[in-house]
Amino acid sequence: MKKAKRADQVKIKKPKIRRTWTRSPVTKVKESGKIYKRKRSADEANETDLTRDIEKTYKYCPRCGAEMINKRIDHKQRKVCPVCKFVFYHNPVPAAGVVIEKDNKILLVKRKYEPYKGDWCLPAGFMEYDESPQKCAIRETKEEINLDVELEGLFGVYSGKDDPRTHAVLVMYWAKVKGGEIKPGDDAEEVRFFGKDQVPSNIAFLAHRQIIKEYFEDK
Ligand SMILES: [Zn+2]
């Protein structure tokens, strides 16, 4: 999914302070390639400590451009603006997706871009600010695989701590195909149904691996 540029992020006027680095910490981490390393197990990902991720967020206030400071608020270290008092609450980002089945097979999408380029996952994506999880799941399905779907109920809710972009909370729905023909969208290289013994070993994201496992456990 495309990330919209927020107007308040674009217009930040940075104060004239000598910077101690030439690249943002976020860029640094990405370029090292470290965060794309896959975790070994779901347990390991669940134990992942994300508290230090706060340092990858705002160096300068997204509202007024002053340098942010660390402050303990509500039992957590948070980035706070000493000038306009803006507090950055580092919340997970909600995402939604679908489980589509046909003849006891599950539909997976091969990822065209990083993270986990070339790996398979379920159709899913991050929620836009103005949409519900249901709308997001339906939109992402149309964008990624060109299918019009109807949601049939909740499959489950998952924590995605091994997504290098953010800590995602993934809401997955059962979905029934209403129309459209399968065609990989801009983000997808290939779309296929997989049976229990055909699931590829390279599944992107531990939450998706868990969903596939749970789907076939019921078969
Ligand atoms: Zn501020």
Image (spheres, rainbow, N blue to C red):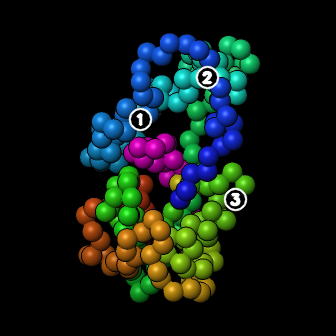
Q: Earlier in the sequence, mark 3 or mark 1?
A: 1
Q: Which residue is mark 3?
A: 132
Callout 2: helix, strand or loop?
Answer: loop
Inspect the image, locate mark 3, and give the three-letter code of the amino acid beneath it: Ser
Q: Quadrant of residue 23?
A: top left
Q: Residue at x 63, y 38 (%)?
A: 10
Front tag of 2 and 3: 2
Q: Which residue is mark 2?
A: 14
Q: Residue at x 37, y 34 (%)?
A: 29
Q: Residue at x 52, y 30 (%)?
A: 57
Residue 168 is inside the magenta segment? yes
What is the crowding at mark 1: few (fewer than 14 residues within 10 Å), some, or many (at least 20)? few
Where 105 falls versus 51 (above or below)? Answer: below
Q: Which residue is mark 1?
A: 27
State the CA–CA distance, disc 2 to disc 1.
18 Å
The one of 36 and 19 positioned closer to us in this rendering: 19
Give the residues in magenta.
152-169
Where 158 falls versus 197 (above or below)? Answer: above
- Relative placement, left or right, of 56 versus 190 is right
The one of 153 and 26 positioned closer to us in this rendering: 26
Where 91 falls versus 42 (above or below)? Answer: above
Q: Are marks 2 and 3 in contact (CB under 8 Å)?
A: no
Callout 1: helix, strand or loop?
Answer: helix
Inspect the image, locate mark 1, and give the three-letter code of the amino acid beneath it: Thr
